């Protein structure tokens, strides 16, 4: 029932409404992934869907401190799957951040 924002302003909107999904397997990398072929390779080799750059750092500290954690992410780009003329991350980063906050608040309300 969580409604996520689709538009940045009256003229810039995602092509479809964002949805909340549980990811079975994701990974963190030390590079910004903007390459469709590499994204496809990672999916085929490791059976992962999202790739981010921060979650592993959180996981490592929590593991060291023996503290359970959960990561809530909002994706802002297509990792090379979009047009080479556009940069989805630059366009949609603020929207993704706001949707991540909304999802986190909703999650905490359900605890």
Image (spheres, grey):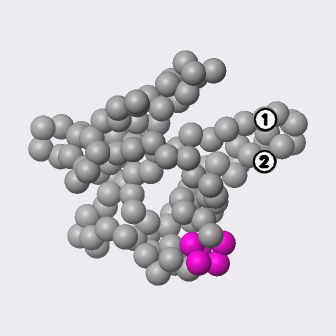
Secondary element type, mark 2: helix
Above or below 93: residue 69: above
- Quarter of the image where one finds residue 8: top left
Query: Magenta stretch?
Result: 42-46
Question: As drawn, is 40 to the left or to the right of 90?
Answer: right
Residue holding disc 2: 60
- Please identify the quadrant where the C terminus is shown: top right
The structure residue drawn at horizontal position 52% and vertical position 44%, both measured from the top left corner, is 73
Foreground residue among 17 and 86:
17
Q: Residue at x 47, y 81 (%)?
A: 37
Q: Is residue 80 left or right of residue 72?
A: left
Q: Nearer the viewer, residue 101 or 44?
A: 44
The percent coordinates of residue 93 (x first, y second) are 37, 46
Q: Residue furthest front?
A: 1
- Mark found first going from the N terminus, 2 or 1: 2
- Residue 61 placed where, x, y %? 79, 42
Single out the mark in the foreground, 2 or 1. 1
* Residue 29 location, quadrant: bottom right
Q: Residue at x 44, y 75 (%)?
A: 35
Can residue 28 be spotted in the picture?
no
User: Residue at image x 40%, y 70%?
Assistant: 80
Please rate how many residues cluster around mark 2, counting C-alpha atoms within 10 Å: few if below 14, some from 14 to 19, many from 20.
few
- Whether residue 6 is visible here, answered yes or no, is yes
Residue 51, horizontal then vertical, whole percent = 56, 60
Q: Main secondary structure of the magenta part?
A: helix
* Image side of residue 33 versus residue 30, left or right: left
Instruction: Report the residue marked by disc 1.
Output: 68
Task: Inspect the magenta stretch and tell me whether residue 17 lies in it.
Answer: no
Task: Tell me if mark 1 has few (under 14), some (14-19) or many (20+) residues whose alpha carbon lies within 10 angstroms of its own.
Answer: few
Q: CA distance from mark 2 to mark 1?
A: 11 Å
């Amino acid at each position: 029932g969580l409604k996520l924002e689709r538009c940045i302003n009256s003229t810039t909107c995602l092509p479809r409404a964002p949805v909340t999904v549980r990811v079975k397997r994701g990974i963190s990398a030390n590079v910004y992934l903007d390459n469709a072929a590499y994204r496809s390779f990672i999916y085929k080799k490791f059976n992962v869907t999202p790739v981010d750059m921060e979650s592993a750092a959180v996981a490592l500290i929590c593991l060291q401190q023996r503290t359970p954690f959960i990561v809530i992410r909002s994706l802002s780009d297509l990792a090379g799957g979009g047009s080479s003329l556009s940069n989805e991350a630059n366009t949609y980063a603020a929207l993704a951040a706001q949707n991540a906050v909304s999802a986190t608040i909703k999650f905490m309300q359900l605890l």
